Image: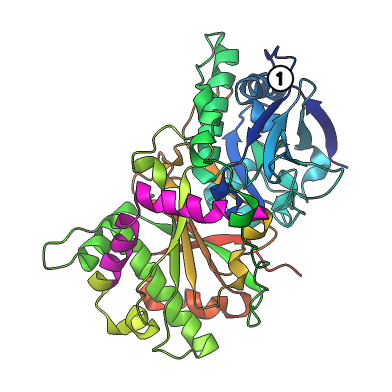
Amino acid sequence: MPQKKVYQIRPSGWQNPKEEWRRMSPVDYGTYWWMNWICIFQVHNDADKPEFLINFKAGLEATLGQCRHAAGTFERNKFGDFSIVTRPNSTATFVELWLDRPNDTETCIPFKEWKEHHNFASESLMSNPSSLVVFPSSSPASPDIPGSPQPTMAFQLTFIRGGAIFGLSSHHWFMDALGCGSFINQLAANCAAVAYKTVPPAFDENLMDRSRFIGPSLPENDLVDVSPPPALHTKRLPYAYLLFRLPHSKAAELKMLATPTDGSRISTYDAVVAYLWRINSKNRASIYKPTLWSKAIFGEPVNMRNKNYQGIMACGSLSLFQKKPLKLSEVISKAPLPKVASFIRTITDSVDAKTLEKHIVKNRRARDKVKLHKTLDWLPPMSLVLTDWRGVGVCGRDFGVGRCVALRAPSDDVVANLVILYPLRQVEDSPDHGWEIVLPFEEAHVYSLLSDPDLKRFFTFCGYEAHAAE
C-alpha cells in the first residue's frame, strides 16, 4: 500500500489577527474548474528525499505567508458576489504520497524510464495520473455550496523511484495559468532560500489586489439576470489528450511556410496554431461531416500582462473569439496557410486595455456572477480554443532541492476542443527538442489522426496525456 499523509499547513510569518476579504473582479467568473499542474524533479538518491520534503514544505509555508490568499476560501460577501477570505487560522491542504517502495512497481514506472522512453507523458507514468493532485479536474468546483467554502489551492508532493512530483491544484477563479506560473516561481525562490539559507525573495502585495478590475457597485435596477451555462453539446464523443513534440527547427520551417508574401508580420505561434487548426479541422471534418461554409470557431485567452497590465499575478487573461470568423472550408484547405496565420495574428492584436474594460463593464451588470461560468464543452466539436503556457518559465527553475525538469497537466476530464502549449523546457541531449503540445481528439479516431502525413511532417507523437473518462 502506498504511504500517504494529509496535512493542513499554515502560512508562516503572518501575524495579522484580522480576516482579509479580497473581492473578486467581474472577469474572474468566466470558468470554474480545478486546474492541475505537476512539476517533475529528478532525485538521484533516496536518502535525499526526507530533506527534499522538509525544505519543500518550509518553502511552501513561506510562500503561503506571502501569497496569503492561496490559503483562502471563496465565500459570499456583502455585495452578493464572492471574495477570497483568509483568516488567522487559515490553512491549505498538503498531501505527502510515497510511490517509491519495492511493492509500488506496478503503480508507476521509474523516473528514468518515464523521461527516456515516454517524454513525461502523464499516462505513461501511471494509469491514474490524477492521483498526483489533491483535486482532479472533474472534482466539484462550484464555490456556491453553503457551509462548505471552496479552497483556492491545494498541494501534493509525490515521491517515485528516482524522482519527485509536486502537484498543484488551483481553482480557476483564483488564478489563470500564468498566475499559477508566478506562484510556482515564487515557491521555487522560497524553497531555494530555505535550502541555501539565503534571504527569502521579496513579494509585492499589490499582486493580490483585484480592486482596479472591480469598479463601483451598481444599483439593483442596473443589474441583469444571466442565463444558465449552456448544456453539453449533443454531438460530444469520448476524447483523448495526445502529447506531441514540435522541434524548434520544424517550428521555424512552419513559420516560413505560413509567412505572408505581402510583408505583413506573423509570429511562429501564429504559424503553428494555424497549422494545428487546419490539421484538427480536416481530420474532424471526416468524422462529423459538417457544412463546409459554416463558421469556423476559434478562440484563445489573450495575456493582458503584455498589454500594459504588468505585474498581475492572479488576473491577467481574457478569452477572445473572433468577430469575423473564417469558414470551415477556408481553414481546412481553401485559404492559403498565410491567410489563416494572419487571422490568428489579428485576434491577438485586436485585444487591448479598452477590450478588457468593456468586458469588466459587461460582467459587472450580472446579478448572479456565478452564472457567468461557461465550460468549453458547449461549443460544437469543430471548434478550437488554444491556451499558451510557454511563457510560464517554470521548467529549469532551481528549487534548492532540485530543478523542475518538466511540467504537465494531468486530467481525468478531457476538454474536447482545448489545445495546450506546455511551458518550454531545455533538454540537455536534444537542443532542438522544441515545443510540447497537448491536442484533444476523438478516442476512436486517434489512429486516423496519427496516420495523417501532414501531421507527421512536423509533429512527433509522444503518448497520451489523458484518455476518455469511462
In the image: residue 30, left or right of residue 349: right
Image: 201 above or below 439: above
Count of number-bearing discs? 1
Horizontal and vertical percent position of residue 423? 46, 45
For residue 458, say whether it is visible: no
Crowd around label 1: few <14 · some 14–19 · many ≥20 (10 Å): some
- The image quadrant where one finds the N terminus is top right
Residue 464: % across, % down? 59, 62
| Residues rendered magenta in the picture | 340-369
Looking at the image, which is closer to me, 175 or 147?
A: 147
Q: Residue furthest left?
A: 262
- Estimate the x, y position of residue 273 in percent, counting from the top left: 37, 63
On the image, which quarter does residue 268 sit in?
A: bottom left
Under circle 1, the secondary element is helix
Residue 130 at x, y = what percent?
Answer: 71, 51
Q: Residue at x 78, y 36 (%)?
A: 97
Residue 441 at least partly seen: yes
Question: Amino acid type of disc 1?
Answer: Ile
Q: Which residue is mark 1?
A: 54
Of the 4 image quadrants, the one containing the C terminus is bottom right
| Residue in the image at 23% along x and 59% along y | 266
Q: Which residue occupies the foreground of this view, 178 or 317? A: 317
In the image shown, does 269 or 172 lie closer to the viewer? 172
Q: How is the image coloured?
A: rainbow
Question: In the image, is residue 382 above or below residue 209?
Answer: below
Q: Quadrant of residue 297?
A: bottom left
Q: Quadrant of residue 314?
A: top right
Q: Is residue 295 magenta?
A: no
Q: Is residue 253 left or right of residue 407?
A: left
Q: Main secondary structure of the magenta part?
A: helix
